[in-house]
Amino acid sequence: MNTFGQTLGLTIFGESHGVSIGAVLDGLPAGVAIDWDAVNQEMARRAPGKNKLSTTRSEKDAFEIQSGFFNGHTTGTPLCAMIRNGDQHSQDYDQLRHIMRPGHADYSGKIRYGGFNDYRGGGHFSGRLTAPLVFAGAIASQILASQGVVIGSHILHLADVTDKGFSPLGESTATLQALKGETLPVLDKEQAAKMEERIVAAKNDLDSVGGVIECMVTGLPAGLGDPFFDSVESCISHMMFSVPAVKGIEFGDGFALTGLRGSQANDAFYYDDGVVKTKTNHNGGINGGITNGMPLIFRLAVKPTSSISQSQDTIDTDTQENCQLVIKGRHDPCIVQRAVPVVEAAAAWAILDVWLSAKGRCL
Ligand SMILES: Cc1cc2nc3c(=O)[nH]c(=O)nc-3n(C[C@H](O)[C@H](O)[C@H](O)COP(=O)(O)O)c2cc1C
Ligand SMILES: C=C(O[C@@H]1CC(C(=O)O)=C[C@@H](OP(=O)(O)O)[C@H]1O)C(=O)O
């Protein structure tokens, strides 16, 4: 199934080198006035071909609304948006019909779909399918913002360069919003130039780099989520592994919690003018799968781009022999900075789904 969500259904469709890609958003509340300029801004943050750190494929990522929006408001029935593809170089992919890129989905996709998958540009597996995800998330984040929820992210690590982490007790809305204007969003501004240098160096070596994105969600009330299968961690993780190249997630202190004692890892409660807070936030705003009212924090591992131009060992499925592959084409030397708006959008959609499920489809 290519649909995500319990109360709010998101279906994404299309192939990177097909006519179009798009999304169907089902279950949105009726009567929401959407700020389309803000949606366009989010699309532009993710769009390819903007600078030397990204693929040179140039796409406008303009969307055409097909349904679900009438007289300035959502109708509450499925909202469908279509995004046309315009700058495909499909000949770059001719050899990839039968020569499998290591690290990409060529082989697994070929087996899954019996060889009928559209392999051009990675087809339906392409990072291009994150454009409809951003479209959906941009709408979800507007709805969440009306309830006081803010989502922001930065690059915590890129190759061997490290930014300072988010303050676990929360960052201001101004800080989270300001990060959205940056190509390499970091808190310690000196790290951006070093990160850029690592991406350019990898590209010059016909290679790629990966990193870690840290995401924070502020303004969530306590009590959202469910204890087991639909825990907030489960819902967010389910969504985040839909972002191509994401290979890991941790909440709060995550794996580092394993090195602490209980006395160090527990987040002590206190009343702050009648509001329940915790003095630390090692658990990332979630206890028992349910939000506790503190900022939600998670980190994602993003792998280095698999399509590199060095010669690599692989297989030819036509001849059933081992062979060498030199990939042609226009690939991102680093996915991390391109994935930042995608992660925020994906978080917005997953959290709005949790919210509407908890509150019986209502805000
Ligand atoms: C925004 C974005 C851009 C991407 N750009 C590329 C790219 O240019 N070349 C590439 O090989 N992979 C790229 N990827 C990653 C692949 O789509 C992904 O590695 C592939 O679908 C296999 O999925 P997996 O890595 O999650 O196993 C990109 C991913 C995202 C989110
Ligand atoms: C098109 C986008 O990114 C693409 C993601 C991608 C991949 O394999 O994931 C491979 C490249 O595709 P192509 O070879 O067609 O240029 C990227 O350009 C986009 O982000 O909109």
Image: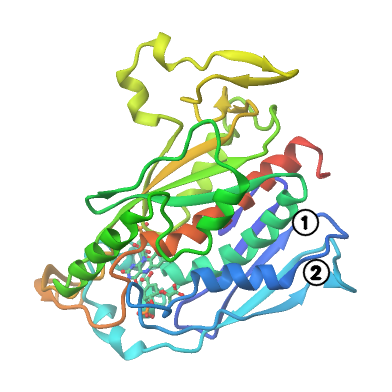
Residue 285: give x, y in percent of width and height: 56, 29
Residue drawn at x 74%, y 78% is 66
What's the colour scheme?
rainbow
The crowding category of the residue bearing disc 1, from other C-alpha atoms within 10 Å (few below 14, some 14 to 19, many at least 20), is: many
Is label 1's Cβ within 8 Å of ligand 1? Answer: no
For ligand 2, which image quadrant applies? Answer: bottom left
Is mark 1 in CB contact (under 8 Å) with mark 2? Answer: yes
Q: Which of the 4 quarters of the picture holds residue 279?
A: top right
What is the count of numbered marks? 2
Residue drawn at x 49%, y 50% is 153
Decide: is 98 above or below 259: below
Residue 28: give x, y in percent of width and height: 77, 56
Decide: is 232 above or below 149: above
Left or right: residue 26 compared with residue 261:
right
Q: Mark 2 points at which residue?
A: 68
What's the residue type where badge 1 is placed? Leu
Foreground of the two, 72 or 109 = 72
The crowding category of the residue bearing disc 2, from other C-alpha atoms within 10 Å (few below 14, some 14 to 19, many at least 20), is: some
Q: Mark 1 points at which residue?
A: 28
Decide: is 209 above or below 128: above
> SS of the residue at dot 1?
loop
Labelled disc at residue 213: none
Residue drawn at x 50%, y 37% is 297
Left or right: residue 218 compared with residue 25:
left
Left or right: residue 120 compared with residue 16:
left
